[in-house]
Image (cartoon, helix red, strand yellow):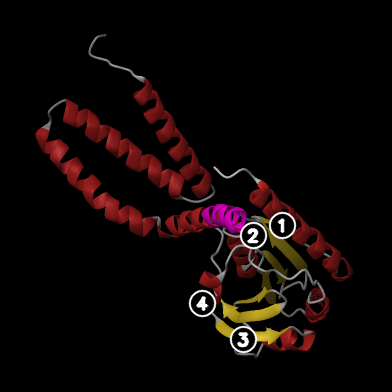
Amino acid sequence: MDFIRFTIVDILDIFAIALIMYYIYKLTRGTQAPNILSGIILIYLLWIVVKALNMEMLSAVLGHIIGVGVVALIVVFQPEIRRFLQVLGKKSKQRRNSFFSKLFDFREEKTTDMSFLNPVVKACADMSASKTGALIVIQEYVDLSFITETGITLDANISSSLLKNIFFKNSPMHDGALVINNGRIVAAKCVLPSTQSDVPISFGMRHRAALGVTEVSDAIVIVVSEETGAISVARNGQIKIGIPPDALYQELIALMEIVSEEQNKVETAPVQ
């Protein structure tokens, strides 16, 4: 067994690969990506065996397939790659905010005034009664400029009338999401990333988009179903369906307090 040399570096190498594969599986779970990845890994293992046996022709063919497959992977896994980078950006931004807040005793100003929720809740209750579809994103600490840049900039005060007019069926801005930050409407008609996870077949595009943006940010999203009028709230890749209009305010307050507590833990954690 002298030809097999197994050192601590090899152990770390195997552990790192296993960790990467685990996170790739966790990220792509619920999609077709794991099946495609399994096929690619089998081809790669076959190429290693063929190369070790000095089967030059088959080795060359498989080598070219793997070479072209790198480009194909980027195309096939474009949604997963984008989602992975967004999640990575979310975590790195949280760490960066924590570091600079400790270094300069500075954090981005965020309003603690929750009065803006009153017109939001009233508008959602009215839209629920009239079965008007709506998708409202409440930005927390993670920057959503990559979302607001896809829509129409408004920078307007929040009122229930304005919200209902934006999501009115014949309004030019009723499609897409509306983003609220620091008690103001930042943009409307924004495009949200759709979730790649397994969701019930009854979920529409609004619910999928709500889950998608909460998987890559700490935002809180309100969904009003156009089919049933049911109100749902999503956060952290989870969604609560069928919230009564009179309970929506307390639900939002509770979720915002959870996000604030999580952010405080990040900022008070020891800097690595």
Q: Residue at x 38, y 21 (%)?
A: 8
Amino acid, disc 3 = Leu
- Whether the residues at callouts 4 and 3 have beta carbons within 8 Å, the answer is no
Find residue 266 and report its horizontal and vertical position in percent: 64, 50
Which quadrant would residue 18 be assigned to in this image?
top left
Question: Residue 147 colored magenta?
Answer: no
Viewer-nearest residue: 155 or 241: 155
Amino acid, disc 4 = Glu
**What number is the disc on residue 259?**
1
Using a 10 Å C-alpha cutoff, classify the residue at mark 3 as few (fewer than 14 neighbours), some (14 to 19) or many (20 or more): some
**Bounds of the magenta segment:** 91-106
Using a 10 Å C-alpha cutoff, classify the residue at mark 4 as few (fewer than 14 neighbours), some (14 to 19) or many (20 or more): few
| Lateral position of residue 27 relative to residue 251, left or right | left
Kindly report the distance in space between the C-alpha atoms of the residues bearing marks 4 and 3.
11 Å
Q: Is residue 197 visible?
A: no
* Lower position in the chain sequence, tag 4 or tag 1: 4
Question: Residue 92 colored magenta?
Answer: yes
Query: Helix, strand or loop at disc 4?
Result: loop
Amino acid, disc 2 = Asp
* Lower position in the chain sequence, tag 2 or tag 4: 4
Which residue has dot 3 on it? 154
Which residue has dot 4 on it? 149
- Whether the residues at callouts 2 and 4 have beta carbons within 8 Å, the answer is no
Q: Residue at x 57, y 57 (%)?
A: 100
Is most of the magenta stretch helix, strand or loop? Answer: helix
Amino acid, disc 1 = Val
- Whether the residues at callouts 2 and 1 have beta carbons within 8 Å, the answer is yes
The residue most toward the left is 56
Viewer-nearest residue: 218 or 260: 260
* Lower position in the chain sequence, tag 2 or tag 1: 2
**What number is the disc on residue 22?**
none
Which residue has dot 2 on it? 218
